[in-house]
Amino acid sequence: MHVLIVEDEVSLANELMHFLTQEHYLCDWAFTGREASEKIAVNRYDFILLDLGLPDYEGLDLLRETRQLEHEPAIIVLTARGALEDRIEGLGMGADDYLPKPFSLLELQARMQAIVRRKFQVKSHVLEFRGIELDSMARRVTYQGNEITLTKKEFDLLHYMLLHRKRIMTRLQLTEHIWGNVLEDSYDSNYIDVHIKNLRKKLAEYIPNDWLETVRGVGYRLVA
């Protein structure tokens, strides 16, 4: 998952980035609302962790602005504001959750996982596809009890495609969510193609190789 942390408290932002990176999230950080607005306009984030008390921007305005975009990242409001009115307004404007400061990092992670389950309509952290089971918590992939050894990038690619199994994923989208921000006119799609080739080779020992369709000139799509 690609996460944007919008937080002007440097120590908290560093703590969030360190924790989430260890949990295999890909993180960006914006210190100001203006910087956050620019990042959100050009990148497709899965999560935005939004502090309302920014030095140059009203956090609720940034929330409203984000909800007008074509893609809709999940937004968790992180703020010291405890007033009920602020919580109601933020949730009413499209925030997915609200976590008052100070908060537990483990609680934040649990809330993010709950949002992922709701968003992608999955009931647990184990995703199944044609006999393969992917455990996103243990980061294990198995087939009929036999573990399939994948690299970190291969696991992340498979996980992301399983979550978006009903969509065609472009090479640029996959690159952004595995390697981070890229410029559309300079990225090398060969990075994705090589990892897809290796992933196909490893899974071919367990399922027919028609599980992933190459959409010419676009990207890839899972085949049920």
Image (cartoon, rainbow, N blue to C red):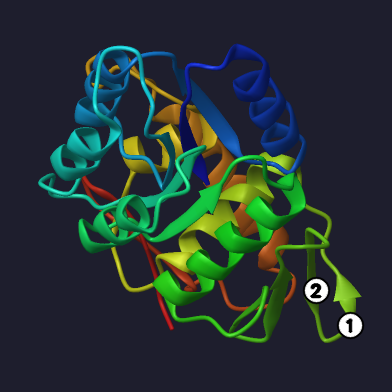
> Label 2 amino acid?
Thr
Q: Picture coordinates of residue 58 (x, y %)? A: 24, 28
Query: Is residue 70 left or right of 220 when viewed as pictured?
Result: left
**Labelled pair 2, 1 in contact (Cβ < 8 Å):** yes
- Judging depth in this view, the residue of 165 and 146 nearest the camera is 165
Residue reaching furthest to the right = 146
Q: Residue at x 69, y 41 (%)?
A: 24
Q: Is residue 147 visible?
A: yes
- Judging depth in this view, the residue of 54 and 72 nearest the camera is 54
Q: Picture coordinates of residue 138 (x, y %)? A: 83, 62
Q: Picture coordinates of residue 192 (x, y %)? A: 48, 37
Few, some or many residues within 10 Å of mark 2 (<14, 14–19, 20+): some
Q: Residue at x 68, y 38 (%)?
A: 20
Q: Is residue 186 above or below residue 169?
A: above
Q: Quadrant of residue 153?
A: top right
> Label 1 amino acid?
Gly
Mark 1 secondary-structure assignment: loop
Mark 1 sits on what residue? 145
Q: For the C terminus, which image quadrant?
A: bottom left
Query: Is residue 129 left or right of 93 when viewed as pictured?
Result: right
Mark 2 sits on what residue? 142
Mark 2 secondary-structure assignment: strand
Q: Quadrant of residue 214?
A: bottom left
Q: Is residue 193 visible?
A: no
- Judging depth in this view, the residue of 185 and 65 nearest the camera is 65
